[in-house]
Image (cartoon, rainbow, N blue to C red):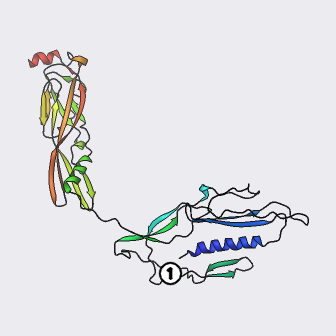
Amino acid sequence: MLRPRRIAAVAALVMCLVGVAAAPAFAGDPYGSTTCSQNPHPGCELAAGQDGTTAGPDQGVSPPRSAPDDGSTGDRATPPPGDVALGPSDSAHCAYVRSDFQPPAAPIQPVGLRSTPRGSGPRVVAAADWSGTLVVRPAATGPDGRPGSWYVYQCQTPGLRDALYRPPVWIADAPAGPAPAPAALAEQARNQLRLAGPAISMSPVRDQLVQLPTWLWLDAAGWNQVAATAAAGGVAVTAVAKPVSVVWSLGDGGTVTCTGPGTPFPAGADPKSASPDCGYTYRHRSLDEPGGTFTVTATVRWDVTWAGAGQAGAFPGLTTTSTVPVRVIDIPSLTTGGG
């Protein structure tokens, strides 16, 4: 079926061209032409103008330009003043889009047209049986019984010319493939986990002291479960990473394993007090090492489990690591007193 607005617009333009062609010659004869082609896509070009010659008793009238009928541009003369050539940028961008169109049960009939005058102005061409209301029903299955939708040809951007009307087409939905294996989705979910490196904190804040307890801890905000989900084909699997321990390598050969993030050093506490859950005491200074510092490394181990689609499992643990340089100095009074 043709869209009433497009029918009216094309018909009105054709009537205008006919009216122009029938007008008497004044300063120059007007002309109009229509060129239709199927390649590269169905469409028509409409042209109208004035040849620019002066008509008189002793002068002939220049005929309108001829237009090729093969759809090509052909060799056209330079257009007279006032004409505008349409380029690709003037064309509307059109494509088939999914819609809720549903064809009527009755056979499709050609649209009847009628021409009626509007006041003292030009006549208006409209569909004779057009009620102004289009009723559609959502399409669930097509003529072949398969799920899908009707697609209609629509133009998404304004243009000075448009392709000819194209009928709706039925496109069936792609057949559903086999459901993905939950274990494969679990692997994808694990790869999507975003585990940040641990934020190291120590006390004393600046240099560590030989024979004085060092408190070790991580930012508690980073000691939380992290989850990621992968889904496909109606199946969803979630992987969860949980921090379970942190191994501290203090740079002087010593290591400490803590089962939690550690306790921050409380303000005003005795500097000689030891951490209740995660600490270390240096026995040698770092000033004798290359660069004068020890490299402290914190490695967090994460347990990773997954569940989904009625199944569950576990992956080998993941680890995240951070390092900082630490200078360790000695104070003779502490060293002597501490042996």
Q: Is residue 38 left or right of residue 104?
A: right
Report helix, strand or loop for mark 1: loop
Residue 74, placed above or below residue 326: below
Return the residue nearer the eye: 315 or 291.
Answer: 315
Q: Position of residue 125 (x, y in %)?
A: 65, 78
Q: Is residue 139 left or right of residue 211?
A: right
Residue at image x 18%, y 22%?
Answer: 209
Q: Position of residue 86 (x, y in %)?
A: 65, 58
Q: Position of residue 142 (x, y in %)?
A: 38, 75
Residue at image x 27%, y 57%?
Answer: 231
Label 1, residues with CA under 10 Å away: few <14, some 14-19, many ≥20 = few
The residue type indicated by label 1 comes to: Ile
Q: In which quarter of the view is residue 199 placed?
A: top left
Residue 282, placed above or below residue 246: above
Q: Position of residue 243 (x, y in %)?
A: 18, 43
Where, quadrant-wise, is the C terminus in this rendering?
top left
Q: Is residue 273 visible?
A: no
Return the residue nearer the eye: 241 or 293.
Answer: 241
Return the residue nearer the eye: 273 or 114.
Answer: 114
Q: Which residue is most to the front?
A: 70
Q: Which residue is mark 1?
A: 108
Return the residue nearer the eye: 53 or 101.
Answer: 53
Q: Which residue is most to the left?
A: 339
Q: Is residue 82 left or right of residue 226?
A: right
